[in-house]
Amino acid sequence: MMRPLVLLSLALSAAPAAAQTCHVLRGGAETVIDAVVLDDTPTPRRAVTVIAPDGRITCTGPACRATTPSPTTIDCAADSLSPGYINPHDHIDFTGDPPAPDTGERYVHRHEWRIGLDGHRKVVENPNEDPEIVAWGELRMLISGVTSIVGGGMAPGLIRNLDFPAGLEGLPIRPVTFQVFPLDDAPGIMRTADCNYGHHPSTRGDVAGSQAFLAHVAEGTGEAARNEFRCLSNSAYDTTAQADGGGTAHDLMMPNMTVLHGVGLTPDDLARLQTSGATLVWSPRSNLSLYGRTLDVLTAERLGIPIGLGTDWLPSGSMNMSREFACARRYSNDHLNHALSDRTLWHMATIGSATATHTQELLGRIAPSTEADLVLYRPTAGGPYAAATHDEPGDIDLVMRGGRILYASADIAENLALPGCEPLMVQGQPKRLCIRRDQPFSFAMLQQDMTEQHIYPLAFDHAPRDEPPCDTLEDHHSRHAAL
């Protein structure tokens, strides 16, 4: 039987308001937030964060004070104040493809499910770039604390789209490069002993000329997946060119390079990657649901490789960052002896993902001169970092991008008289979406359209419907053997 959806209703009388945990006072253009500031220390403390009218942080610490009289004040002393999450890997233009019930089928290489090779079932169809559907996918991320994304598609004015010039929302950087097929292997080319892929593979110059070069590499568990890394990390591996171009290996591993997935990487491969200064992005749910394996994240951590955390996409990954945390935490607890703490997972989604996108001077930290991309999480028994990694969208009091509130609890939005806000219920909590100034459509219109098209909802009251499993291959076999 299907779990009931959380209805994102425009009628707030259907559920009681949560107890108010914040006290706010509308004032001038400068904003002051009082909360427990997550700063990557073991025991973060309550501090004041001051935000200038231009959306930059000017001061953070116990002694900080506003520089203007009567600032806007948001006092959520028990909440955790976190940098907005950066999702460095998603395919947001597949928002219209919901996850299907798990059939138990697992793959060795991504081309098997992409194209249906080796007798396997093809998983997805074609992307849908309908602006409304993309916006719906971005809203799903926004209400889980994501303020920036690398997603291969974009909707203006919601979260930052780091791979599009028009999506940077004022960041003084170049967009990152998002490369799905660095070996030009989209037709389904798999090799194990040479680099005879497509004729136009990515080059070292492509990487060196990018703000950050995020590329799918070694997405699979077999030798064909690992061969991709050999062709992209050792120029001596294959020096024989194909007649029509390509065919030779290139060493793309350098500080600008970010490897997405890396499921097939061995400890020696990871050591080579670490020496090069490259980074990784981990997407545990999608890896486990497709391959029954995932990146050797403990070895990568031990080597000191910066690691970001990404959702991959809706069909086989997590619907939002909250669910990706849930999978990462389960994998850590069941298979890594609880090695990944809440603080470590939080670090991946903030500092690690900022490093993976080379935006660490502006995003991923709460510090002077960084962007006020901020999220307030309600307190939980597990402590400040647990609040940020265990909370669901209904537990979030505020999401701010560049000093501008886009999502907030009803009491904060109403007391601040935020413009362009529309009501909605998320997991039984009254919220406000304040996105109308950026969008050609209202949230009410968008919600109606998505409902009519049967698009996967923004939130669920329990585990999402048909959520892809977060099990290793051994877990999967054991579970089915017990049935």
Image: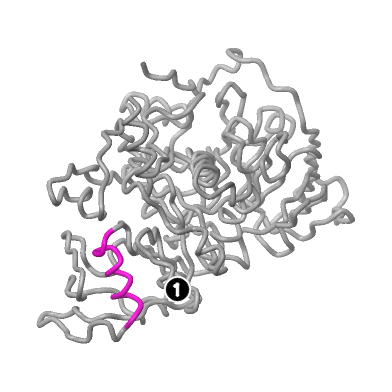
Q: Quadrant of residue 145?
A: top right
Q: Quadrant of residue 213?
A: bottom left
- Asked if 302 appears above or below 448 in the picture, the reply is below
Q: Residue at x 31, y 61 (%)?
A: 180
Q: Residue at x 58, y 13 (%)?
A: 14
Is 390 displayed left or right of 262 in the figure? Answer: right
Q: Residue at x 37, y 65 (%)?
A: 215
The answer to whether residue 141 shows anywhere in this view is no
Range of residues picked out in magenta: 222-234
Q: Quadrant of residue 378?
A: top right
Please state which of residues 245 and 267 is positioned toward the viewer in this rendering: 267
Q: How many marks?
A: 1
- Magenta span dominant secondary structure: helix
Could you classify mark 1 by the number of other residues whose Cα lies within 10 Å: few (under 14), some (14-19), or many (20 or more)?
Answer: many
Q: Is residue 28 magenta?
A: no
> Where does label 1 land, which residue?
273
Q: Position of residue 430 (x, y in %)?
A: 62, 24
Which image quadrant: the N terminus? top left
Q: What's the residue type where badge 1 is placed? A: Leu
Q: Position of residue 288 (x, y in %)?
A: 38, 46
Is 356 displayed left or right of 376 in the figure? Answer: left
Secondary element at image label 1 = helix
Which image quadrant: the C terminus? top left
Q: Position of residue 198 (x, y in %)?
A: 18, 71
Is 93 displayed left or right of 139 in the figure? Answer: left
Please state which of residues 87 and 161 is positioned toward the viewer in this rendering: 87
The answer to whether residue 201 shows anywhere in this view is yes
